[in-house]
Amino acid sequence: WAQRYQGWIARSGLDGENVENVLLSIVDPWAFVVDSLRGHLYWVDRNGTRRANLDGTGVVPVLLPFEAWGGMAFDGEARELYWPHGKSDSSQEGIRRAAVDVLPLDPVDVIQDDDLWSAISVDVGSRQLFWFDYFSRTLRRAMLDGTPLDPTATVTNPVPRMVIHPLTHEVFFLEEGQVRRVSPEGGPIGTLP
């Protein structure tokens, strides 16, 4: 997990034991993903997007500041990193992706959306990409190649984070202090107890 305002990333066992700071003195980290197959951690902070080994060694820059702005998602099957592409004024232009096997990353535009919020997530099982559209207040989706699909749901005030259930493909997100879930094809939004 990242402690954004204190500038570190830590890890622990699944039982919460053996907490260990992996990276220290990071300037405002706000998103990260893990490539467990290759043992890498990718994160976004004010200095750009970087990669390190899971123990915090071997830090290398992979994208310039403001190239990635906000969330990140990782497709472990295709070994591709997805991120909201930002402008220097911190507004979004769309979503890009790049294969992570060769540095520097070679970005490809996937989605153009000026109203993109920072939350994005990849559903590897259905080969879909999800993101929040800020102004229309919708949870949007597309195939990983950028082919648009119908929006999934209208949301009121989501927190810009989400996860996809690997078996049911449901999208889980926070909204107004509640954990919500919705099918990727749409339908009613459920609230977890």
Image (spheres, rainbow, N blue to C red):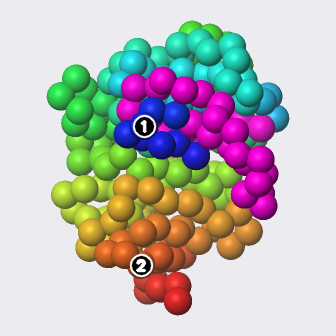
Question: Where's residue 106, x and y in %?
Answer: 53, 16
Instruction: Check disc 1 and give the amino acid type.
Output: Gln
How many marks are shown on the rendered structure?
2
Q: Residue at x 38, y 32 (%)?
A: 28
Instruction: Check disc 2 and give the amino acid type.
Output: Gln
Is 43 left or right of 178, judged from the image as shown?
right
Is 145 left or right of 152, judged from the image as shown?
right
Q: Is residue 145 visible?
A: no
Q: CA distance from mark 2 to mark 1?
A: 26 Å
Q: Nearer the viewer, mark 2 or mark 1?
A: 1
Quick check: 174 above or below 97? Answer: below
Q: Which residues are magenta?
A: 9-36
Is 51 left or right of 63, judged from the image as shown?
right
Query: To which residue does mark 2 refer?
Result: 178
Disc 2 and disc 1 in contact, CB within 8 angstroms: no
Q: Is residue 112 visible?
A: yes
Quick check: 189 above or below 140? Answer: below
Task: Tell me, for residue 154, which label it has, or none.
Answer: none
Question: Where's residue 81, x and y in %?
Answer: 58, 33
Task: Tell me, for residue 6, which label it has, or none.
Answer: 1
Q: Residue at x 78, y 61 (%)?
A: 15
